[in-house]
Image (tube, grey):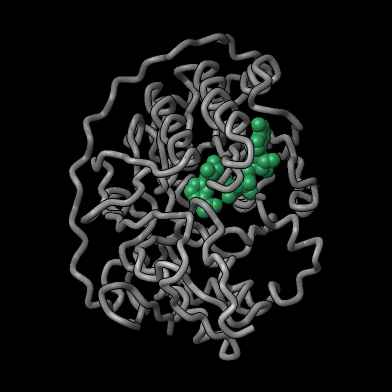
């Protein structure tokens, strides 16, 4: 319906970066209209200014907030705590491992030979983990991070925890604010309180912590979350870093994962482009930042490998070339879906008021290079999104 007014990004958090490294990838960013992403991550033919490097924040000493379990319960292979040990085999607990991000991270960990324990309340069912349950190195535990005793038991034999479990996105948090606070803050405190000094903790933080910021956000920019989601995630990051954990502040993620989410800006707009076809975009000039789900997953592997270096710190995860306005994203989608028309409207307001641009220099120094462009991510979405059933669409939204 031409002119139908729709909220453009119902999705809450997420962002993504990505520099398409593919041969003929192009992207649009706020520094110019279309530019090639063909060669390197750092200078993808983009006329944008060089990213500024950020100074590293002072590393905090590793300290326990409160430790309940000191015994290792029979496992002795690896003392993971403070080493940069690329290539060692770990037992990794992934909370929220059955979710959008988790179902991309877990197979990567298994492929590297790690043992993986998914600890998840399985809010979205088991469908997303069916392709990996055959792995002898995978254990699945249905559990809630608010269940302190169970969590403590299950964490004991692990060398590392990748903590993803959360109520994700501002609409889902607003639906039940108390549950969001309990899970995102107290649930994270439970993990932090159980963590031994020899265990690594890597936390999925978010660019939503920044809110609306003039200029470019580095890891030292004071955080100013605009939503309950952003503030509860910021609290979780603070708790994580207080015990030497790593906070990965992800850009808004996009792309296909075994647990698909359509309530993320790029995925949502792509879905609307093929279903509603004509719709309004509010606040198209707002700046956001994006990252393909596979590249987001790779950042967690980098954090496992470089734990000693990264311990106690926050890292923005993305790429400057993926700092785009919402209008840039809409134009990229329109190019790929010619029958859709996304008009910019000044008559409505998007509830998600994030407007910020991010520097990714700090993680880039550790060798992080995104590999999938927005354009390629939309292309892969277009292979399945038009064919999703109503039920598949329903469970692909967090509210
Ligand atoms: N997707 C993004 O763009 C993005 C961006 C920045 C940060 N993050 C963060 O990444 C993490 C994963 O997000 P996602 O996109 O995969 O979301 P998701 O909703 O697909 O996954 C969350 C998972 O956590 C589980 N879970 C929820 N509450 C739980 C509880 N109390 N105990 C145990 N498990 C519980 C759910 O069952 C689900 O499998 C979140 O912490 C989110 O804040 C995501």
x, y percent for residue 262 = 63, 61
Residue sitting nearer the eye, 31 or 300: 31
x, y percent for residue 90 = 57, 34
x, y percent for residue 3 = 56, 81
- Is residue 115 visible in the rendered image? The answer is no
Q: Residue furthest front?
A: 347
Residue sitting nearer the eye, 229 or 161: 229
Residue sitting nearer the eye, 353 or 349: 349
- Is residue 69 visible in the rendered image? The answer is yes
Q: Residue at x 19, y 53 (%)?
A: 53
Q: Residue at x 57, y 41 (%)?
A: 174
Q: Residue at x 72, y 39 (%)?
A: 138
In the rendered picture of this protein, how many numbered marks are placed on residues?
0
Quadrant of res 222: top left
x, y percent for residue 380 = 61, 74
In the image, residue 69 above or below residue 370: above
Quadrant of res 40: bottom left
Horizontally, is 160 left or right of 226 in the view?
Answer: right
In the image, residue 293 above or below residue 102: below
Horizontally, is 38 left or right of 253 in the view?
Answer: left
Q: Residue at x 46, y 39 (%)?
A: 304
Which quadrant of the render holds ligand 1? top right
In the image, residue 294 above or below residue 87: below
Which quadrant would the N terminus be assigned to in this image? Answer: bottom right
Horizontally, is 46 left or right of 184 in the view?
Answer: left
């Amino acid at each position: 319906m031409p002119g139908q007014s729709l909220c453009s990004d119902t999705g809450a958090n997420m962002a993504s970066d990505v520099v398409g490294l593919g041969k003929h990838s192009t992207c649009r960013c706020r520094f110019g209209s279309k530019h090639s992403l063909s060669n390197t991550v750092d200078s993808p033919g983009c006329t944008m200014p060089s990213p500024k490097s950020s100074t590293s924040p002072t590393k905090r000493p590793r300290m326990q907030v409160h430790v309940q379990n000191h015994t290792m319960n029979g496992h002795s292979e690896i003392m993971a705590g403070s080493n940069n040990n690329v290539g060692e085999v770990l037992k990794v607990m992934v909370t929220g491992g059955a979710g959008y991000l988790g179902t991309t991270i877990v197979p990567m960990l298994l492929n590297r030979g790690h043992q993986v324990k998914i600890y998840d309340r399985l809010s979205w069912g088991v469908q997303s983990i069916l392709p990996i349950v055959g792995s002898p190195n995978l254990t699945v535990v249905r559990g809630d991070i608010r269940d302190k005793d169970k969590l403590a038991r299950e964490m004991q034999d692990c060398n590392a925890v990748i903590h993803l479990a959360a109520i994700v996105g501002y609409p889902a948090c607003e639906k039940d604010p108390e549950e969001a606070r309990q899970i995102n803050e107290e649930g994270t405190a439970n993990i932090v309180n159980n963590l031994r000094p020899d265990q690594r903790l890597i936390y999925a933080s978010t660019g939503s912590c920044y809110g609306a910021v003039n200029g470019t956000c580095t890891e030292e920019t004071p955080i100013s979350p605009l939503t309950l989601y952003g503030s509860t995630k910021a609290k979780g990051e603070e708790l994580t870093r207080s015990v030497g954990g790593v906070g990965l502040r992800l850009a808004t993620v996009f792309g296909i994962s075994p647990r698909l989410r359509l309530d993320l800006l790029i995925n949502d707009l792509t879905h609307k482009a093929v279903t509603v076809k004509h719709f309004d975009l509010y606040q198209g000039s707002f700046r956001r930042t994006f990252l393909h789900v596979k590249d987001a997953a790779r950042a967690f592997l980098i954090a496992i490998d470089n734990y000693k270096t990264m311990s106690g710190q926050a890292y923005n995860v993305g790429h400057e070339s993926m700092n785009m306005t919402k209008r840039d994203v809409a134009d990229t989608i329109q190019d790929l879906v010619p029958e859709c028309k996304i008009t910019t409207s000044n008559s409505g307001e998007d509830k998600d008021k994030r407007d910020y641009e991010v520097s990714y220099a700090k993680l880039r120094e550790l060798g992080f290079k995104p590999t999938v462009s927005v354009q390629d991510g939309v292309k892969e979405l277009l292979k399945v999104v038009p064919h999703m059933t109503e039920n598949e669409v329903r469970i692909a939204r967090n509210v």
